[in-house]
Amino acid sequence: MTFKNYIFFIDRLKKGDEKAYEFLIDNYYRKIYAYAVSLINDKTIAEDIVQNVLLKTWQYRKKLDASLSIQSFLYKSVYNEFVNTYQKSKATTYLHYKYLENLEEITTSVDDNKIEYFFKIVTKEIEKLPPKCKNIFMLSKVDGLTNIEIAEYLDISIKTVEAQITKAYCVLRGKLGEQYKSVLFIYIPKK
């Protein structure tokens, strides 16, 4: 299917016309994929970026502006997604480093009985958290869900998720003190 009139195409897309979405993919996928590859030089990650952009375009299609170029919008979205992906991978690398550093600190400086004791105390304090705060903290730290996934799962805002996780850490640090910082950082309780 072809859409010769651009404004009609955007209108159909905004109204949820799947044919218009197919047209969007058929006409722009290769272009934005090539652009993503040029940014990241990894075909798998580039494909993920493009798929995320296309999915978000569909999810937020009602906000599209017919007076702006869809191609420019897609290129800008790919760039933004690339930046987000880069920042996440950079943050993940740093967190992984800190995790390993703390794990080594614990395993070399503390005996097994003391580690088990620390984990029991941390688990006990987590159980005392307010229900909503505890639930969000456990979804993050035990189930390994991202803040976005938790927000979608619980139908709450990402800011609420972030606030509850921060609150959990503050409460736990306040009750447990600095000596538990390393244990709390690597804490993953048994289900």
Image (cartoon, rainbow, N blue to C red):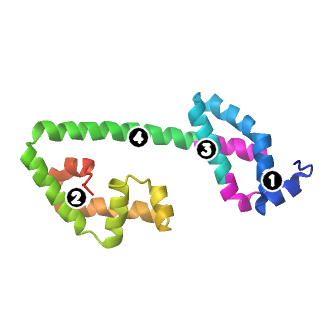
Q: Which residue is mark 3?
A: 80
Q: Earlier in the sequence, mark 2 or mark 3?
A: 3
Task: Give me the C-alpha separation between circle 4 and circle 2.
Answer: 22 Å
Local secondary structure at mark 4: helix
Question: Residue, x 41% and y 40% (percent of image)?
Answer: 92
Q: Position of residue 114 (x, y in %)?
A: 8, 49
User: Mark 4 belongs to which amino acid?
Assistant: Thr
Residue 31 drawn above or below residue 168: above
User: Mark 2 belongs to which amino acid?
Assistant: Arg
Local secondary structure at mark 3: helix
Q: Which residue is mark 4?
A: 92
Q: Which residue is mark 1?
A: 20
Q: Earlier in the sequence, mark 4 or mark 1?
A: 1
Asked which quadrant contains residue 64, the reply is: bottom right
Task: Give me the C-alpha separation between circle 1 and circle 3.
Answer: 24 Å
Task: Give me the C-alpha separation between circle 4 and circle 3.
Answer: 18 Å
Range of the magenta residues? 57-81
Local secondary structure at mark 2: helix
Q: Position of residue 24 (x, y in %)?
A: 78, 47
Q: Is residue 77 left or right of residue 87?
A: right
User: Mark 1 belongs to which amino acid?
Assistant: Ala
- Magenta includes 19? no
Task: Tell me the mark number nearer the camera, choosing from 2 and 1.
Answer: 1
Q: Are marks 4 and 2 in contact (CB under 8 Å)?
A: no
Tell me the quarter of the image containing the C terminus: bottom left
Asked which quadrant contains residue 65, the reply is: bottom right
Q: Nearer the viewer, residue 98 or 26?
A: 26
Q: Which label number is shown at residue 173?
A: 2
Question: Residue, x 73% and y 47% (percent of image)?
Answer: 73
Q: Earlier in the sequence, mark 4 or mark 2?
A: 4
